[in-house]
Amino acid sequence: MIWGVIVLGYLSGSIPFAYIAGRLFKGVDIRAVGTKNMGAHNVMLEVGRGVGIAVLLLDMGKGALPVLVAHWLGLPDWMALLAGVAAVLGHNFPLFLGFSGGRGLATSIGVVLVLMPREALVAAVVLGILYILITHSICFSAILSFALLSLIAWRWGRPLVLIVAPLALL
């Protein structure tokens, strides 16, 4: 059963929503324009805010889906995390685009939103504040927020697998 959710994770992660959006709405390969990253942020910059937000939600969903399925099947958190990591690997190295993908930030956020929603929401607020007020770098802000997420999980007494989960997704 675990192999099924891992394969589901990888295949769902491999769906290149940013690439599809770039081709569909602007006729471009999103990997060749702007930041050259196949992610929601680049889609926002190059295709449009609304399309970028849709890609963000879809990319988060492809991280959340295998974790939700693992929980639905009654699998423990560590197996759900493996399914989520597989989704991130699918996003970063998509089968459908010759293993050339994005950074996996939105997909990772989808994984942690399912594994620990309260902690993830706190870290998301911090991510927004760091990005807007201090760093202006989504990558650096995300690294800091994921580290904070591990600290929050530890402080709130979460199991070890959930404490290390955000670090495993970086």
Image: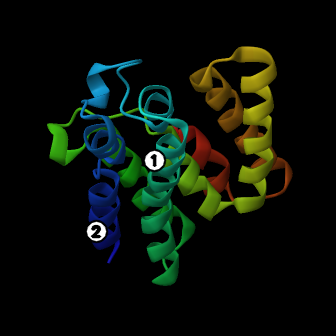
Can residue 91 be seen in this snapshot? yes
Mark number, residue 36: none
Residue position for label 2:
3
Label 2 neighbour load within 10 Å: few <14, some 14-19, many 20+: few
Q: Where is 119 relative to 139, above or below?
A: below
* Of pointers 2 and 1, the one earlier in the residue sequence: 2
All told, the count of numbered labels is 2
State the residue at coordinates (62%, 28%): 143
Q: Is residue 138 left or right of residue 41?
A: right
Classify mark 2: helix, strand or loop: helix
Can residue 74 be seen in this snapshot? no
Q: Mark 1: which amino acid?
A: Val
Camera-nearest label, 2 or 1: 1
Q: Where is 52 relative to 100, above or below?
A: below
Classify mark 1: helix, strand or loop: helix
Q: Quadrant of residue 164?
A: top right
Q: Where is 72 relative to 61, above or below?
A: below
Q: Where is 103 relative to 7, above or below?
A: above
Mark number, residue 55: 1
Q: Is residue 84 left or right of residue 77?
A: left
